[in-house]
Amino acid sequence: MLPEYIIPYYLHPIGSRMAKIEDCPGFETFGADVKAARKAKQLSRSALADMIHCDSRYLANIENEGTLPSLPVVIQL
């Protein structure tokens, strides 16, 4: 068994789950803000997902399910 500090994040039981809003206070409206901005620009979810190089289902989870995006996706948004 590898020491915990050597286990890659995607194999670690905690690191393998997506961060949720309740894990990060201050981001409670992030998904709703992304959705409102997307709609204000009259972009479909699919079009925005293509622009930021992510899957539209991932973007839907950000907008509707309280999933916090990875830092590269935050930067793209």
Image (cartoon, helix red, strand yellow):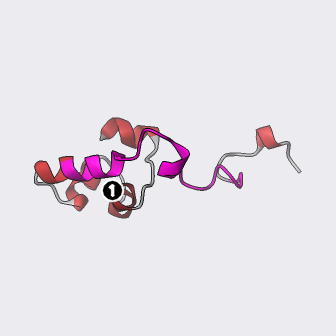
Q: x and y percent of residue 24 in the render?
A: 51, 42
- Say which amino acid is labelled 1: Glu
Mark 1 Cα shell of 10 Å, populated few (<14), some (14-19), many (≥20)? many
Horizontal side of 7 relative to 62 (left or right) equals right
Horizontal side of 24 relative to 39 (left or right) equals right
- The residue carrying mark 1 is 63
Query: Residue at the spot x=18%, y=60% of the render?
Result: 44
> Does residue 63 sit above or below 28 in this rendering?
below
In the rendered image, which quarter contains the C terminus?
Answer: top left
Residue segment shown in magenta:
11-36
Q: Is residue 28 magenta?
A: yes
Quarter of the image where one finds residue 59? bottom left
Badge 1 element: helix
Query: Residue at the spot x=32%, y=39% of the render?
Result: 76
Query: Residue at the spot x=54%, y=54% of the render?
Result: 18
Residue 54 vs residue 28, the one in the foreground: 28
Q: x and y percent of residue 15 in the render?
A: 64, 49
Query: Residue at the spot x=45%, y=48% of the render?
Result: 68
Q: Is residue 27 magenta?
A: yes
Quarter of the image where one finds residue 30? top left
Residue 68 vs residue 75, the one in the foreground: 68
The mark tally for this picture is 1
Residue 25 vs residue 43, the one in the foreground: 25
Q: x and y percent of residue 32 in the render?
A: 29, 52
Q: Residue placed farthest to the top in the image?
A: 75
Which secondary structure is most common in the magenta stretch?
Answer: loop
Q: x and y percent of residue 12 in the render?
A: 71, 51
Quarter of the image where one finds residue 42? bottom left
Q: Residue placed farthest to the right in the image?
A: 1
